[in-house]
Amino acid sequence: MINTMECAVDAQSLISISLMKIHNSRTQRGGIKLHKNLLVSYVLRNARQVYIKEKYAEIYRMQQYEEVMTVCNEIQELNPLELDAEDADDEEQARAACCGEEASLCGTACHRDAAQQPAAHGRAESALHGCSPLEDDHKEPEPSYYRSCCMEASPVSHCDQFPANSSAHCNKTTVLDLDTHVVTTVENGYLHQDCCCDALQCGQSAQSPAKKRKVEFGCCISDVEEVSDFTAARKRAKREDCSYSNPDYTDTSNISNLISIFGSGFSGLLSRQADLEQICSKQVLASLGAWTRAIVAF
Amino acid sequence: MGEDAESSKINHTFLRDYVTEADVISTVEFNQTGDLLATGDKGGRVVIFQRETESKGEAEEAGETGDSGEYNVYSTFQSHEPDFDYLKSLEIEEKINKIRWLPQQNAAHFLLSTNDKTIKLWKVSERDKRPEGYNLKDEEGRLKDISTITSLQVPVLKPTDLMVEVRPRRVFSNGHTYHVNSISVNSDGETYLSADDLRINMWHLGITDRSFNIVDIKPANMEDLTEVITAAEFHPHHCHLFVYSSSKGTLRLCDMRASALCDKHTKLFEEPEDPGNRSFFSEIISSVSDVKFSHSGRYLLTRDYLTAKVWDLNMDKGPVETYQVHEYLRSKLCSLYENDCIFDKFECVWNSSDSVIMTGAYNSFFRMFDRETGRGVTLEAWRESSKPRAVLRTRRVYTGGKRRRGDVGVDSLDFTKKILHMAWHPSENIIAIAATNNLYIFQDRVNPDTQTQ
């Protein structure tokens, strides 16, 4: 009988289920079934595409917000009464630095920011009054993103709660892709490969994160290993032989180990739909698990 | 093992829930005359049933009380044993994937049976006479003392109890690296094809150490693999044509006269995907699990997870008919993926006149579609709800609207009771349905012959 409760048609859970199936197929009687594993890999690909899109959307939102928060923080540090003009310049430079180096990811964001520059001054001013720059009524593109970020924190000190840099637990994850030998360092939601270091410095002025936020925004998913770790953090108890007991990202599960053995995957798996993905396509391809590796080995 | 529902008098209720894995029927096939019905199971055994040869005229006059037309066990033999590939450290299952009968040429019957790797040709022959009166041996077979022989006699054949002998005549091994999913005997009566996930081989029935590879879709780099072969069949009349289906939902008609290697298809049958129905599982549910030529040779019947489709060989743009087998499962695909039901491979069959198609579903249901009217009917192969010789009543899965008595809700369906394998008599309205470890044989008493419909 089918469980009357619909299973979560969730990209992450599908990825973990699919990986489990591939893992189990290795020990099934009769050898690896090529057809079934091929179909499972298609589900994996689809789920991963959806997951990547969601993640990129999140990162984009977060980065949009962080830029504004950076501005907010910088303004706070300076004496608002004396350094108005310089603020504007600094903001522009900071924004340009952020924008320029994250152009590959946030091209559209930069354009938007440029458009906002005339309003920056106004924003800085409003920021003087209690550091709530995003709650005024100036016209910003996609204000819903900012508002959604803001709303989730207490109005008093939300500047502190939305970090650009998470320090203690998971500010840095380094991944070595065994196939392409590319080292990927993920920090604070920035893809290290595509963004310059300076961009990070823009975002590193905030203080330590709230752990809750870090879980959701702290790490950019650029690798399947992290995908499975997230999955591990969220889905438990169904899997008997995987240690999904804690959300520590450095704890690799059996599935992560499995993925690290795989190399690059089907060339047909690469999505060509989103521009964002295209830009990071090289990295996406490098970090895709080779679902066929298990099949090729036999 | 398999049992004929119409002759079972034994109460098996207490055994109902206990099913040995090895007893699960994995293939069902009538021979060309319909007198013999072969089933293969996961334990590598083949059971052949034979139809009783009482006069059918009597049975029709007597109504439902006639005995003729029943199938009884004719012979049982172990076709394949579990095997082990030492080179790859792989266990080879003994499960019989397919059985195909050869056209009968003499008193003996021949059939091909295959597991994942090896195809075997079996000769099924009857012996109802034995020679008696040997000169050198006595009745028990012991050598006689020569000094006691005073005269010579010619041994004579005396009738004896019917004995069915099954002997392996050919073993076609080492032809396949991947798992064999189909075999099909050619209309020329001399050759047959066997298909695995990536290759199709053509064999001569008399030659076991050689086969011709006619289709090879293995990519140079396995990481570029996008589809596998799921089923293949020869055309019923044209010995140079065959079709194979893929996991992507496409069919390829190949002509062996075109070239030795038929990688390039003669015709590609493909239906464009409906973008509105795109989901995580689109690729899985579009994979074709079975393909069958119609008896006329003009149409193709294919089965994917949710539908059965009829294609016209003359039109490759799309199917001419599409039948929804269990569309109500479309919203359950995620759960079906979790419990692996989405990978079930259903077979499909034509009736003898190509006017009705039939395929299986869950909850012991199977569906028949009348091609003329487009109407489908759901029937159940379940011992509890049908007594022998009772008329099957139609069932319904409740999907909304007015609920009738006897309707089954989608969430009450038992997905462990799946009808995957079935066969239709080549000339009469008799069907054989494999339901896990049981074999159900249904006959249409009202219209026993298709011609009278």
Image (tube, coloured by chain):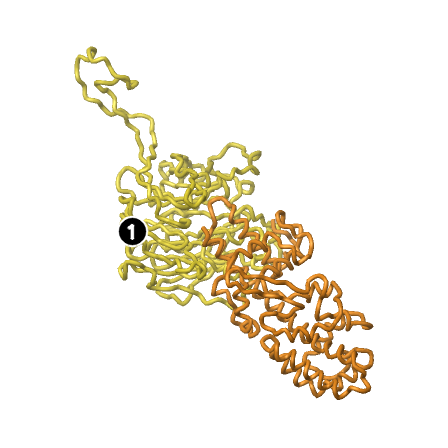
Identify the hue of chain A.
orange
> Residue B294's spot in the image, x, y percent?
37, 55
Q: Nearer the viewer, residue A26 or B256?
A: A26
Q: Nearer the viewer, residue B33 or A119?
A: A119
> Residue B250's spot in the image, x, y percent?
42, 61
Chain whose colour in the figure is yellow: B
Q: Provide the chain ID for the residue under circle 1.
A: B
> Does residue B73 show up?
yes
Task: Tell me the quarter of the picture where residue A228 sits.
Answer: bottom right
Counting the numbered discs, the total is 1
The image shows residue B105, relative to residue B130, as above or below, that is below
The residue that appears at 52% across and 47% down in the rendered structure is B418
The image shows residue B52, relative to residue A226, as above or below, that is above
Q: Nearer the viewer, residue B326 or B63?
A: B326
> Does residue B397 show up?
no
Image side of residue A198 versus residue B71, left or right: right
The residue that appears at 31% across and 25% down in the rendered structure is B160
The residue that appears at 58% across and 65% down in the rendered structure is A184
Question: Which residue does the numbered mark 1 point to in the structure image?
Answer: B187
Image side of residue B90 versus residue A76, left or right: left
